[in-house]
Amino acid sequence: MKNFVLLAFILAAAISASGETTNSTENFSPNFSANTEILWQAPANQLPENIWIYKRLPPQPFLAAVISNAVVLAALQDMEFPKPSTNAFNISSAPNPCGMGFVIFSIEPATTTISFASTNQTLATNNVPNDEAVTKRAYECAARFGLDRAHLIAKPVYTSSTAPGCDQTLTGGICGRGIFLSRKLAGVDFFGDANNASDGFAIEFGSGGQIRSFSLIWPNLETNRLEKTASPEEIISGIRAHKIIVLPNPGEETYFKRLKTLATAKTFTITKITPCYSEGVFGKVPTNDAPSEFIAPFAEVEAVADFGKSNAPVRFASPIISSDFTKFDVR
């Protein structure tokens, strides 16, 4: 698993699905006409008055206890335990018939990440833990990494199914359940899930409760500055100025066509707004593989586009800091 700066993740998903090569952020926002009415019906208490921006501290070695617990959870304790270091450490699988192996266990202090993926992931569907058991065990495992439950928010449990052709007697069955425990900063969690993980802890269990994979992403942070949260009027102005990003649906192949359709809406009603954090700053695409210097907030927004005879739900990302709208010159 890997950290995704919000914008890079969205652009990659949308461009990949559509075959487009454009990367201008305005091309990911509906171009509403002046006649489109934008309404705000989200509860007023869904946004705090102020919100923190955090700065990443220089990488530090993981504690010896964290490393040893990670090795034990990965069932790799027959190997020599790595010592705390700022250098990366990897364990690779045995070469396959083609002479190639792959990394199954990794410690990356530069990104403050520890990850594991088992090479013995059985496709058996018996005794896979249920949602309640997965959640309980995930919190127990997170505690072994020194994570405080008060700083975690559980995202919905997901399932993994056997792939067609692997074993036809099991095709379509559930062979794993997992969960992403998002990091929580001042009551606000991170955007993402177990497949596109941000800061937090993700883990998946298979038949008999076997750990199939896990990933810890937990950089050391310090508060950088407290910013005023944008008002509904500013966010509406940002929508008018094409400074939002419509989130692509899973597997969507007609993303840009949907944007053009959204632009014809007669009314666009905001029904819910949720602050969340992401690696990086909204509107800035990463130019290298270096970790983002800042952890910054944005808003995940739900809306309904009404076309007169039909309507459609919409999810989009928006800046959430008031000063960002000054930068966009939309007041």
Image (tube, rainbow, N blue to C red):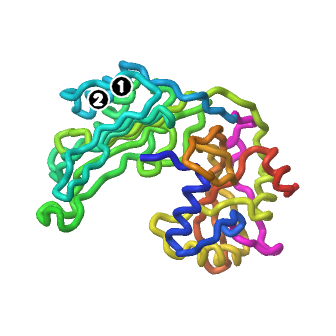
Q: Which residues make up the magenta segment?
A: 29-52
Judging depth in this view, the residue of 247 and 87 nearest the camera is 87
Location of the C terminus by quadrant is: bottom right
Q: Are marks 2 and 1 in contact (CB under 8 Å)?
A: yes
Residue beneath label 1, please? 67
Between the residue at mark 2 and the residue at mark 1, the CA separation in whole angstroms equals 6 Å
Residue 203 in view, yes or no: yes
The kind of residue on which mark 1 rests is: Ile
Horizontal relation, residue 249 to residue 269: left or right: left
Q: Judging from the image, what secondary structure is the residue with disc 1 in?
A: helix
**Residue at the image position 25 percent from the left and 39 percent from the top:** 211
Is 12 drawn above or below residue 284 in the view shown? below
**Residue at the image position 57 percent from the left and 59 percent from the top:** 10
| Furthest residue in direction left, as rendered | 169
Q: Return the mark for residue 71.
A: 2
Is 66 drawn above or below residue 179 in the view shown? above
**Residue at the image position 60 percent from the left and 72 percent from the top:** 21
Q: Quick one: label 1, few (<14), some, or many (20+) residues within 10 Å?
A: many
Would you say residue 38 sits in the magenta stretch? yes
Q: Position of residue 182 (x, y in %)?
A: 48, 38
